[in-house]
Image (tube, rainbow, N blue to C red):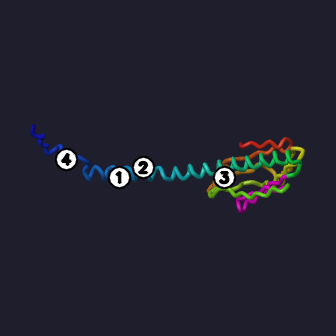
Amino acid sequence: MQPRKKTETENDRGFTLPELLIVMVLLGILAAIAIPSFFSFIDSRNAASAANQITADLRLSHGTARNRLSNIQVTFNTTSNCYNVAGNGISRNRCLPEGTKFISSITAVEFKADGSAVVSGSGDIGVARASRSTPEYRLRLNTQTSRIEVV
């Protein structure tokens, strides 16, 4: 049995240069549309992550104050976008992720051993993307119950 001869069309496999160029142009257009949305999404997720981290630290500070029967203070620095948790041998300094900032008139929260909280300033603790002037996430603190909620 003799091997079958390949015809000319069977040897011509693959894509032509114009086909490849069209696909590359379409991919470039899609990337130009998608990349700005992707970076905006990343900044939004950083703001959500920062709000969740602050909420977790405030709740931990409240629980620690009640368990250790001592006062724990959380101070906010809006210029450096950092906050410090201190009291009863605890000292933690945390900063917000890059591209996020505080928007708040609250400078400190002190959790008391009896479960209450004393707030220096008024309003809510706001977290926003650095490019925005209004907060995307607000942390509301009830001073009687020390309940913290993200609004």
Which residue bears the numbered disc 3? 128
Please, what secondary structure does the residue beneath circle 3 have? strand
Specify the quadrant of the image occupied by residue 73.
bottom right
Answer with mark 2 or mark 1, whichever residue precedes in sequence. Answer: 1
Looking at the rendered structure, the number of numbered marks drawn on it comes to: 4
Amino acid type assigned to the residue bearing label 4 in the image: Asp
The answer, for residue 94, to whether it is visible in the render is: yes
Report the Cα–Cα distance between label 3 and label 2. Answer: 28 Å
Q: In the image, is 142 to the left or to the right of 134?
A: right
Q: Nearer the viewer, mark 4 or mark 1?
A: 4
Tell me what residue is drawn at x 28 percent, y 49 percent: 19
Please, what secondary structure does the residue beneath circle 2 have? helix
Report the Cα–Cα distance between label 3 and label 4. Answer: 57 Å
Answer with mark 4 or mark 2, whichever residue precedes in sequence. Answer: 4
Amino acid type assigned to the residue bearing label 2 in the image: Leu
Which residue bears the numbered disc 2? 30
Dot 3 alpha-carbon crowd within 10 angstroms: few under 14, some 14 to 19, many 20 or more? many
Report the Cα–Cα distance between label 4 and label 1. Answer: 22 Å
Q: Nearer the viewer, mark 1 or mark 3?
A: 1
Tell me what residue is drawn at x 66 percent, y 52 percent: 128
* Residue 12 marker: 4
Q: Main secondary structure of the magenta part?
A: strand
In reply to whether residue 81 is colored magenta, the answer given is yes
Please, what secondary structure does the residue beneath circle 1 have? helix
Which residue bears the numbered disc 1? 24
Q: Nearer the viewer, mark 4 or mark 2?
A: 4
Tell me what residue is drawn at x 39 percent, y 50 percent: 27
Magenta residues? 72-87
Tag 1 and tag 3, C-beta contact below 8 Å: no
